[in-house]
Image (cartoon, rainbow, N blue to C red):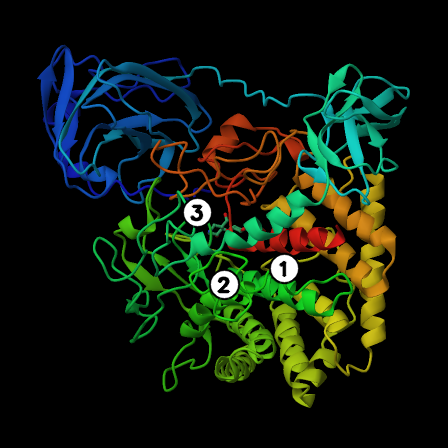
């Protein structure tokens, strides 16, 4: 399945005339050259141009690229009708130069017709002398309509591009991908809490226990012990031992753990990193905001123009129509957060994200280790900082206002329901700033799931903003009640799996959990019998909810259960609800104890989910909540130990949080944190969580590099790997909740 698309626009009309005379290449898997006239010995024959003046020069082809175009594809050179065979590996090579220096070319192998899927793309920087660039990729499809395109547009001033020796060789052996996993002693590369658990994993062939040593920054041994052999870990296929150095409580920086002749990456024992991570994880949202400029004084290096306001080339979100035939009105749906690395805005995923940020705030109000000031006013460097409202609430409100705008207006069919999503008509390529997106924006049909996401979060907002802005709280509650009523009237309007062009589908076939969640939030806010009865009558209320994955955007029963357990109410069976959370936590604790990498996650068959890092964190949220409910330290230790995995104690020896740890994800899939493709673009900001290992490897890059991967190995820190390495508002919400909890334990 190809979800990411690249908009090449219609270039088919520009085919060079000579092309049709050439025989089609063989369709087999022979190592054959697919490009015709790649050395330009026949001038420009077989090549097309678009938006540039090009001709033979210096033995190759040179193009004068005009300044002032917007999109990469506004100026391009390419060749069409290349046969590609599914599963066959190709080597694309070319020599290219650019003058003056500072320009880059987007070299794409993709589909020459709509929807212009990209099977491989690279954006190398060019110098005036020219370099040869070579890449290998595996075609995810069979097609006779393959295209190689060199996209040159988007520069402010004119420049000259030259190309030679273009080759697309089929039938080459796939490049073996060997991740660099560094030292075999795997630790939390960021920090262990002085009074928290301290565990590590050693990858070794040794069968019996081995000595280990903890060194401080000066290299002095401060603790010693012996490893515990754990056998072959099914989540990685490695033979491993575990190390417990929890008895050491001295703090400091630059500790290393030494075992089996290997020295771990350095780490701290202290609390400071979690105080920082709590803020950075929550600061992620400001830079995801749509409809407002991101101020460089607030996020140095990350300032950018407002996205999707009504300024060209954006079509703007100020008056967005529905997809054809879906509705007759337009809505102002400006604002909100971009979901991820794309420019879409989705009510379903926005809902769980808002819930978890508000839950982070609400936990701080009720938990015995909670600290409401930690994400209070002035902590997150927002435009609203200093307004007397906790910054976390200011940030969540940015999305809430958007969710409210997605509600179908009174007097229209399906009034009170919420549109499932709004996004581009077609997928766009990378990199692309939000303010540069030229695509048409469309509202997709309302869904019951989106409507209940709105009801749940607006109800939750009503109780949390009441102290700061009673007017907003009342507006939110009215919208929540209206959404609830609309959902009851239309209980099975489901978003289809097929609606995935230009944006994610977020399909959900079971909305019983969303009904339960919305009813729970409405009940906790209002105490009203109607909502209480729905909670008590729902089969979800007594169901066992704590499976391999506690909750995510599609599974929202546990958020309800956690809130019913922790937010004060008169729910008649509240004690039973609290016990059920504890029983769930016991199960995650057992999973964690059995796991040599110490995580509360063991999906069936080690089939890691899309966004597995956040699934692990969400399971840890259940452990942390059990600790909040009971004060029992074993749950606290389990929750904290889960953070170790995300911060480096894993088979790949990588921290999945940008800016945290010696080796951390930084090339996450994003259209505006595209440093890997464009030296002028930044990496994601510190505190951005990568989705992490995903056994289904849906994107072509992962399919090529990670084929046959086992569990934890199904990850690559490459911007093209949208199925293992994206950033999203819901994943960072799990990180925000857990980082805040961990900081509170310091
Ligand atoms: O995280 C989502 C995952 O659970 C779904 O299986 C997948 C397909 O619908 O979509 C993922 O979400 C993506 C969304 O559709 C579009 N924005 C980026 C999201 C993260 O990759």
CA neighbours of label 1 inside 10 A, class few (<14), some (14 to 19), many (20+): many
Depth check, front residue: 119 or 520: 520
Residue 252 visible, this orientation: yes
Label 2, secondary structure: give it.
helix
In the rendered structure, find residue 686 and report the number of the disc placed on it: none
Q: Does the residue labelled 3 lie within 8 Å of ligand 1?
A: yes
Is residue 590 shown above or below 451? above
Residue farthest bottom in this picture: 529
Q: Which of marks 1 and 2 is nearer the N terminus?
A: 1
Label 3, secondary structure: give it.
loop
Q: Name the residue under label 2.
A: 395
In the rendered structure, find residue 341 and report the number of the disc placed on it: 3
Q: Does the residue labelled 1 lie within 8 Å of ligand 1?
A: no
Q: In this view, does 430 lie to the left or right of 399?
A: left
Q: Earlier in the sequence, mark 2 or mark 3?
A: 3
- Name the residue rendered at 61%, 62% in the picture: 356
Query: Answer yes or no: do the residues labelled 1 and 2 have beta carbons within 8 Å?
Result: no
- Name the residue rendered at 67%, 81% in the picture: 523
Q: Position of residue 306 (x, y in %)?
A: 32, 56
Q: Earlier in the sequence, mark 3 or mark 1?
A: 3
Q: Position of residue 174 (x, y in %)?
A: 49, 19
Q: Is residue 376 left or right of residue 209?
A: left
- Name the residue rendered at 68%, 79% in the picture: 524
Is residue 633 shown above or below 661? below
In the rendered structure, find residue 374 and report the number of the disc placed on it: 1
Count of labels in the image: 3
The picture quadrant where one finds residue 46 is top left
Label 1, secondary structure: give it.
loop
CA neighbours of label 3 inside 10 A, class few (<14), some (14 to 19), many (20+): many
Q: How far apart are marks 3 and 1 (CA)?
A: 28 Å
Q: Position of residue 422 (x, y in %)?
A: 38, 62
């Amino acid at each position: 399945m190809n979800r990411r698309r690249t908009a090449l626009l219609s270039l088919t009309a520009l085919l060079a005339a000579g092309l049709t005379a050439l025989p089609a290449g063989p369709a087999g898997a022979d190592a054959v050259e697919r490009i015709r006239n790649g050395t330009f010995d026949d001038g420009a024959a077989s090549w097309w141009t678009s938006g540039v003046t090009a001709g033979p020069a210096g033995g190759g082809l040179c193009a004068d690229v005009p300044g002032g175009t917007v999109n990469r594809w506004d100026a391009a050179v390419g060749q069409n009708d290349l046969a590609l065979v599914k599963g066959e590996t190709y080597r694309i090579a070319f020599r290219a130069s650019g003058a003056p220096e500072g320009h880059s070319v987007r070299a794409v192998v993709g589909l020459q017709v709509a929807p212009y899927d990209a099977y491989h793309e690279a954006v190398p920087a060019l110098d005036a002398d020219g370099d040869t660039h070579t890449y290998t990729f595996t075609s995810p499809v069979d097609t006779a309509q393959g295209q190689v395109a060199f996209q040159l547009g988007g520069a402010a001033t004119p420049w000259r591009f030259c190309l030679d020796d273009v080759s697309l060789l089929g039938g080459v052996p796939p490049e073996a991908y060997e991740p660099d996993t560094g030292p075999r002693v795997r630790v939390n590369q960021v920090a262990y809490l002085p009074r928290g658990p301290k565990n590590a994993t050693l990858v070794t062939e040794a069968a019996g226990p081995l000595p280990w040593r903890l060194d401080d920054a000066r290299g002095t041994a401060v603790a010693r012990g012996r490893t515990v052999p754990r056998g072959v870990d099914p989540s990685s296929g490695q033979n491993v031992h575990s190390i417990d150095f929890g008895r050491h409580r001295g703090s400091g920086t630059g500790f290393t753990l030494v075992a089996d002749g290997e020295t771990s990456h350095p780490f701290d024992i202290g609390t400071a990193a979690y105080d920082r991570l709590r803020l950075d994880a929550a600061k992620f949202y400001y830079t995801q905001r749509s409809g407002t400029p991101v101020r460089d004084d607030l996020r140095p290096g990350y300032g950018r123009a407002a996205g999707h306001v009504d300024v060209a080339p954006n079509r703007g979100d100020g008056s967005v129509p529905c997809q054809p035939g879906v509705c007759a009105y337009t809505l102002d749906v400006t604002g909100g957060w971009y979901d991820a690395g794309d420019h879409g805005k989705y009510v379903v995923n926005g809902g769980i994200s808002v819930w978890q940020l508000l839950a982070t705030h609400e936990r701080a109000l009720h938990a015995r280790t909670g600290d409401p000031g930690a994400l209070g006013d002035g902590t997150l460097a927002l435009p609203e900082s200093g307004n007397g409202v906790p910054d976390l609430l200011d940030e969540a409100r940015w999305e809430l206002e958007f969710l409210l705008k997605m509600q179908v207006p009174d007097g229209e069919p399906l009034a009170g329901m919420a549109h499932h999503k709004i996004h581009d008509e077609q997928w766009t390529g990378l990199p692309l700033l939000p303010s540069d997106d030229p695509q048409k924006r469309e509202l997709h049909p309302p869904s019951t799931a989106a409507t209940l996401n709105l009801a749940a979060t607006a109800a939750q907002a009503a109780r949390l903003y009441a102290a700061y802005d009673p007017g907003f709280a009342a507006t939110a509650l009215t919208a929540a009640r209206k959404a609830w009523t609309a959902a009851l009237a239309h209980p099975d309007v489901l978003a289809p799996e097929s609606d995935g062009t230009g944006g994610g589908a977020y399909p959900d076939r079971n909305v019983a959990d969303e009904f339960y969640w919305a009813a729970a939030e409405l009940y906790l806010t209002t105490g009203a019998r109607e909502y209480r009865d729905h909670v008590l009558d729902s089969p979800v209320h007594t169901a066992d909810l704590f499976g391999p994955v506690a909750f995510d955007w599609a599974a929202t029963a546990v958020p309800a259960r956690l809130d019913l357990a922790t937010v004060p109410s008169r729910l008649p069976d509240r004690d039973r609800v609290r016990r059920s959370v504890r029983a769930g936590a016991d199960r995650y604790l057992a999973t964690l104890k059995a796991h040599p990498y110490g995580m509360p996650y063991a999906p069936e068959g080690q089939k890691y989910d899309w966004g597995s890092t956040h699934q692990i964190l969400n399971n840890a949220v259940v452990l942390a909540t059990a600790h909040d409910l009971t004060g029992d330290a074993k749950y606290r230790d389990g929750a904290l130990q889960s953070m170790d995995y995300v911060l480096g104690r894993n088979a790949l020896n990588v921290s999945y949080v940008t800016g945290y740890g010696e080796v951390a994800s930084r090339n996450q899939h994003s259209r505006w944190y595209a440093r890997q493709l464009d030296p002028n673009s930044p990496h994601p900001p510190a505190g951005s969580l990568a989705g992490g290992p995903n056994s289904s490897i849906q994107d072509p890059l992962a399919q090529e590099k990670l084929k046959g991967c086992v569990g934890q190995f199904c990850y690559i820190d490459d911007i093209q790997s949208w199925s293992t390495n994206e950033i999203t508002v819901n994943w960072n919400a799990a990180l925000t909740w857990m980082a805040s909890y961990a900081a509170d334990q310091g």
